[in-house]
Amino acid sequence: MLDVLHVLHSFPPESRGGVQGYVERLARAQALAGRRVAVLCATWNGAAASQDDWHGLAVHRVPALDAFAQIAELEHPGAASRRVAELLDALAPAAVHVHHWHGLTLDVLAHARARGARTVVTLHDFHTTCALFFRLREERELCAPDVDLATCASCVARAHGLDAAPLLAALGRRQDAFAAELARADVLVCASQAQAAYWSAIPGVGARRPVVLPLPREEAIDPVPPPPVDGPLHVATWGGLVRGKGLLVLLDALRELPPGSIAVHHHGPTLDERFAAELDVHPCSSALTRHGPFDHASLARAVRSYHLAVHPSLFLETHGLTTDEALDLGLPVVVPDRGAPQERIGTRGTTFRVGDPRDLARVLRSVLDDRGQLERWRQGARAAQPSLAEHLGALDALLSSAPVAPADRRAIPP
């Protein structure tokens, strides 16, 4: 019998990302604390269902389903749903902690509740209410919490080159399925106040008030020394190169500033070639250097030459790992006034109006005019953030509550 089964969309070594890294770190800490822990995830490499050991963690991988197959599996339960049920029977977890359903059946919690398991969901993004994960229309405009389904269908259709008409019915079934599955959770968890506030305004699911449990800090990292403050201001930004991360906002801000006064450095893989081509012809493209994929060690070496981190995301970031990385490395940080990063920078940086290049230019101009601001930010205090031990203690309290009694389960959609 397991204490906790973590469920998510993918897991190392097949993929590495913020959610995967958090789950791996969390599962290892729970195992070290004596918990019996395993992972259930989707696999996207075409392999059959399998079990492997990832540095001491038992990982159960099931073939990924696309979004339409997820809906079809709900209407006519088949091999995917049976596989989850059989795993839960074999593992008998006391608690099931779902981090993501992408690629998985939409009845994980139905099976868990039927077996008396405690059910906790951490909402790492808005996938449960948005087929494009982030509720950002065309990677430009944050949708209103009560956006209508027809708008969703047209947005998804444009993103994937599909016909909006048949999508409308499919998205309706998807919406109903996620609403039912979320209702089966004993606890919903958000990583930030900003995420919880937006979530609570979404019709159909917002009535379930989530618990705000900030993600933990990484282990202590020695900050890098600051570079000389003369010459151009070297600005760093990193993450996957997609429009929603706001790099275009940063380049547009440079149009308001003296030529040559700022050099921009982007680290990360190119995920959207069309957007990359758009950056190449931007009037300020000569100020941008794209360094490509990175790891933590190469980033730590690179930021020795940078004065400031600017992460101008258009998304409502639910946490923003890049903010943690910049703060840990000792860089001052500039972020939008939307989403979770603004909650953590404290006096180690400042904010600008989301999506507004002129307001970002105002912030950058203030640094160009007063280079001492960089050191004042470096010496500032970041907002409090829990350690891994504190986070684990708070999460244990949510996971270890008594399982729901059979009489209570009858009120939960089957």
Image: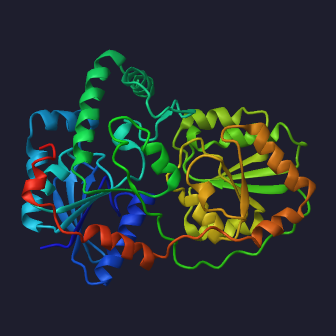
342 or 88: nearer the viewer: 342
Residue found 66% across the figure and 69% down from its top: 382
Describe residue 166's horizontal placement relative to residue 411 as left or right.
right
Q: Position of residue 4 (x, y in %)?
A: 23, 69
Q: Position of residue 215 (x, y in %)?
A: 47, 65
Residue found 67% across the figure and 36% down from its top: 279
All told, the count of numbered labels is 0
The colour scheme used here is rainbow
Describe residue 34's horizontal placement relative to residue 192 as left or right.
left
The image quadrant where one finds the C terminus is top left
347 or 332: nearer the viewer: 347
Q: Position of residue 315 (x, y in %)?
A: 55, 43
Residue 221 occupies quadrant: bottom right
Residue found 8% across the figure and 41% down from its top: 78
Q: Is residue 16 visible?
A: no
139 or 198: nearer the viewer: 198
Describe residue 103's horizontal placement relative to residue 94 as left or right.
right
Residue 204 occupies quadrant: top left
In this view, 186 is above or below 216: above
Residue 165 occupies quadrant: top left
